[in-house]
Image (cartoon, helix red, strand yellow):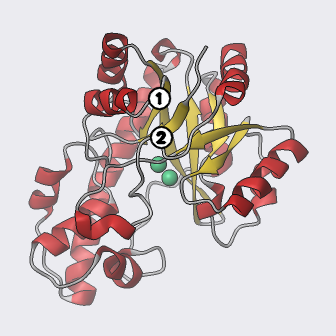
Amino acid sequence: MYKKGDFHLHTTASDGKLSPAEIVTNSKKAGLDIIAITDHDTISGIDSALYQGEKVNIKVIPGLELSTLYNNKSVHILGYFKDPSFISLKFKNFLKEMDSYRVERGKKIVHNLNKFFNINISYENIVKNAHGIITRPHIARAIIDEGYNYSFQDIFKNFIGESCAAYVPNKKLSTLEGIKMLQSLNALVVLAHPVLIKDIDIEELIRFPFHGIEAIYANNSTEDTNKFIEYAKKYNKIITAGSDFHGSISQKDKNLKHSHAIGEVFLDEDGINIFLDKLNSM
Ligand SMILES: [Zn+2]
Ligand SMILES: [Zn+2]
């Protein structure tokens, strides 16, 4: 039986710092025996993570973190698959489309940074550092690398955050569409990090047909976790735990919301059993 699970990890397939194989190996070192790889809008890291999982003897659940919008606010959905064969070609093509949209979006943000803030960075440099998909942290990194004297937080707060002039949203996929798409693939669908969701009534969201909520999350206070566990009980959802580990990009970024350790929070044996029972019933 599995004893320690982290169900929310990012790799270089999206905006993480470590390769899928490194994430798997480091998870094993951190004492985890079951993990899920959940890159943003891509499953391209899954195969090598599964391969490495076999090699170092740790259970790897294929997953992803889908970006959706609810009332124009960003809502992340975690999808977990029993095995990769459930991921259809149609879905792979959909993710490819999302990816090309992201490229256009990245170019637009670069353009807007110049237009509104006179910040000049090259899109090609961002691509060079990104490996996988282009996300806003990559853009923030490029601004700093270009020599502008701003912190990550400044850049998000003033230039590329959701309410800033240079911001361009991701491809519009509604939260309900996202849930339905994942459910059509028999994925287990979980509301990611409710604690990070602002300006939306959380209970309104939890009533959506999610199977579970990420009640245990690295940014939570104890009160947050207790509250989300109560919600899960109230709405009959399972709970998951995630560190949302991205690999800290540098010492400087230590205070960023994504600088957690692998397995910093985890699901225990009982929680894992409930999760796996649900996943296997899909
Ligand atoms: Zn997220
Ligand atoms: Zn995440």
> Which residue is found at the position 33% from the left and 82% from the top?
154
Mark 2 touches mark 1? (CB < 8 Å): yes
Q: Which amino acid does label 1 sit on?
A: Leu
In which quarter of the view is residue 273 placed? top right
Quick check: 151 above or below 253?
A: below
Q: Is residue 97 left or right of residue 12?
A: right
Residue found at x 60% / y 32%: 182
Marks 2/1: CA distance?
7 Å
The residue under the point 32% across, 57% down is 135
Where does label 1 land, which residue? 32
Residue wearing tag 2: 263
- Does residue 272 lie above or below 142 as drawn? above
Taking depth in this image into account, of 210 and 109 the one nearest to the observer is 210
Neighbours of disc 1 within 10 Å: few (<14), some (14-19), many (20+): many
Mark 2 belongs to which amino acid?
Gly
Q: Is mark 2 on a helix, strand or loop?
A: loop
